[in-house]
Structures are given as structure tokens and as C-alpha cells.
Amino acid sequence: MNILLTGGCGYIGSHTAISLVNAGYDLILLDNFSNSETCVIDRIQKIAGKPIIFVEGDLRDSNLVSKTLKDNNIRGVIHFAGLKAVGESVKNPIDYFDNNVQCSISLLQAMIKNNIKKIVFSSSATVYGIPQYLPYDENHPTSAINPYGRTKLHIEEMLKDLANSDPEWTSIVLRYFNPVGAHKSGNLGEAPKGIPSNLMPYLVQVASGYLGALNIFGSDYGTRDGTGERDYIHVTDLAEGHVAALQFMFREQGWHAINLGTGKSTSVLELVHTFEKVTNKKIPLNLTSRRAGDLPAYFAKVSKAKNLLNWEAKLNLEDMCLSAWQSRKISIHE
Ligand SMILES: NC(=O)c1ccc[n+]([C@@H]2O[C@H](COP(=O)([O-])OP(=O)(O)OC[C@H]3O[C@@H](n4cnc5c(N)ncnc54)[C@H](O)[C@@H]3O)[C@@H](O)[C@H]2O)c1
């Protein structure tokens, strides 16, 4: 069965591609390489052990997307493509609405034209905003606190309206928590362009000597050790969650929001100490002031994913840290 992955050469898309090939799906990847490299295609093919169809282009080109859907007899779409840096979205909000919301409109128009009504969408825990209670369950009120989060909420709501307008639509909105780690081969990983804005790739660059020290933004929160707590999930577990979501999508209808996390919170210091233990590297730290917009702590309620998808995360924090470190040769752009 042919599935289109938008943004399929990015961090989560490339790992999901491996899990989907292993599960027997045929894939078409579409990417404009705004945040990935062409060499990822070879890496995916090498690990998957088979050729993958790839289309270079921008999702806002609805004619290209429509042609790709038609020529490849696509049955369903996983929509990863988007910009994802919160700080950048505050500085350039219109770029985020253009790239994230406009991309999604263009994709959905092309899907409607080709009568394809099955989509899995990469959303984020950021749509929950300031926690009214924890763990966040899927019924927690949504209220994004930055432009990035608002683009995710807009897209979620468009998908809900679409599902309400036509019962043949199925939209699975996956709300990711904090994906980290890399494929066990060490040949795929998180390879952001420029200075990483996420914790794990930053840690890897400090441990490799490319960056001097890790800045910890806030050590006076009311958390276990004063640093922020997040629900880190291994990207391989997340990838497997997409296989389960796709199977669910083809047997269900309507709009469904589902958390993908581990249900456990880990502080920045706990993550750093685990990283130091598995890599045998000492990480220099700078404890600095809190960053505007950061939440003290949040983590997922994961029972809906278990009940609906029969999926749960299996890998632990040591697996996450070790795999991120083992992929350093491909995740650092020199
Ligand atoms: N990584 C995280 O921490 C995280 C957490 C929650 C949600 N998400 C969401 O998951 C999705 C994937 O995240 P990721 O970490 O793999 O990001 P990523 O930047 O590694 O991958 C996104 C891919 O989409 C491509 N892309 C972007 N705009 C495009 C466009 N207009 N046309 C075609 N391709 C385009 C990029 O080149 C990149 O390869 C994103 O939508 C992101 O918002 C990520």
C-alpha cells in the first residue's frame, strides 16, 4: 500500500520511513530540504534495503503534490513537513503560518482533488499550553502560547472540520512529546542545520567538543531538582507509533487526537547525568536564567494510545542517550 510522507527526509519522517518499510508499506517521500539533506535518502534506502521513491519539492506547490498523489496511487498520507522552532516562530510568525498552515491547505486540496481522505498529522504537546493538570490527557483544553503552537492548533482544527464535513475522512492527530535519540545503526539521527535548538543534539555537540557548555535555562523551578521536566520519547518508539496509527487510520473514521509519549517526566539534569553515564563524557554546564515561554514541567497520559493503537513506548532514557551519541558522526555538520 502506497503512503506519502511529507517532510519524509526530516528527523521523525526518516525514522518512521524505516518502521513503515519494515511493516510492509511502500513509501513516497516528498521534501524541500529546508531542514534536511539529500544524503538522508541514501541512508534510508541503505537501512531499509530497498529503493524508495523520492520527490523534491515544496508542499505549497499543490499541482506537484496532486501529481505525486495521482502518479503513485497514494492511499494515505503522513504529514510531517513543517517548521518547528518555537523561538524562530516568535520572530517570524508569518513564515510559520505560510509554511505550516499554507502547506497543509495545499496538501489537503490536493488530497480532496484525488479523493484521498486518510491522513496522520504531526502535532505537538505544545497545543495544550499552560497545564491545568498533569499528565496532559487528550481532553486537556488546548491553548497554544506561541505562533508555532498556534499553527499546529489551526491545522488540527482544519482536520476536525474536514472530518465533520465528510464521514469518509479519517484524521489522526498525533501529539508528540519530546522525541530524542536515533536509529540503532547510528546511520540516521537528528541533524539540525546550524546551532541546535533542542537539548539532545546540543548535548551531543558539547560532548563532541563543538560547543563549549550546555546552557540550562532555569534551575529554580518547583521541580524535583529545579530544572525543567519533559516527557522524552525515543524516536524509534515514536516511529513505531506511526505504524500503529496508520493501521488504526485505515480501520476507523473521524478525527482522533492521540498523545505519543512515555508518561514519565525527566529533568534536564537527569537527562544530562544519564548521557554522561552512557557516554563516559563530562558535560560542562551553565546554569542560566529561565527562558520566556518555557513551562516548568509536563508529561503525557498515554492510556489512549495503548487502548486505541495497542502501542506503548518501550525504550528507556539510556537507549535514547546512547543512540543519540552513536549517531554523532552523521548529526554534526562540520
Ligand atoms: N522534533 C520534535 O521535537 C517535534 C515535537 C513535536 C512535533 N514535531 C513535529 O513533527 C514534524 C516533524 O518534525 P521533525 O523533528 O522531523 O522536523 P524536521 O525539520 O527534521 O523535518 C521536517 C521536514 O520537512 C521538510 N519541510 C519543511 N517545510 C517543507 C515544505 N514546505 N515542503 C516540503 N518539505 C518541507 C524539511 O526539509 C524537513 O526535512 C514537524 O511538523 C514538527 O512540528 C516535532
Image: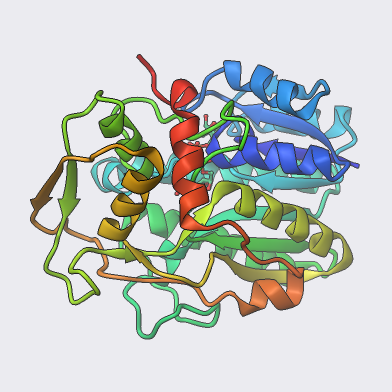
Quarter of image, res 232: bottom left
Question: Residue, x 61% and y 61% (percent of image)?
Answer: 174
Q: Nearer the viewer, residue 41 or 157?
A: 41
Instruction: Count the numbered circles shown.
Output: 0
**Residue 27 at x, y percent in the picture:** 80, 34
Q: Is residue 152 above or below residue 135?
A: above
Question: Residue, x 26% and y 46% (percent of image)?
Answer: 87
Quarter of image, res 6: top right
Q: Is residue 244 above or below residue 181?
A: below
Q: Is residue 93 above or below residue 48?
A: below
Asked whether the viewer can see residue 54, the reply is no
Say left or right for 314 vs 271: right
**Residue 138 at x, y percent in the picture:** 55, 77
Asked whether the viewer can see residue 229, the reply is yes
Q: Nearer the viewer, residue 250 or 206?
A: 206
Specify the quadrant that holds the C terminus. top left
**Residue 249 at x, y percent in the picture:** 80, 61
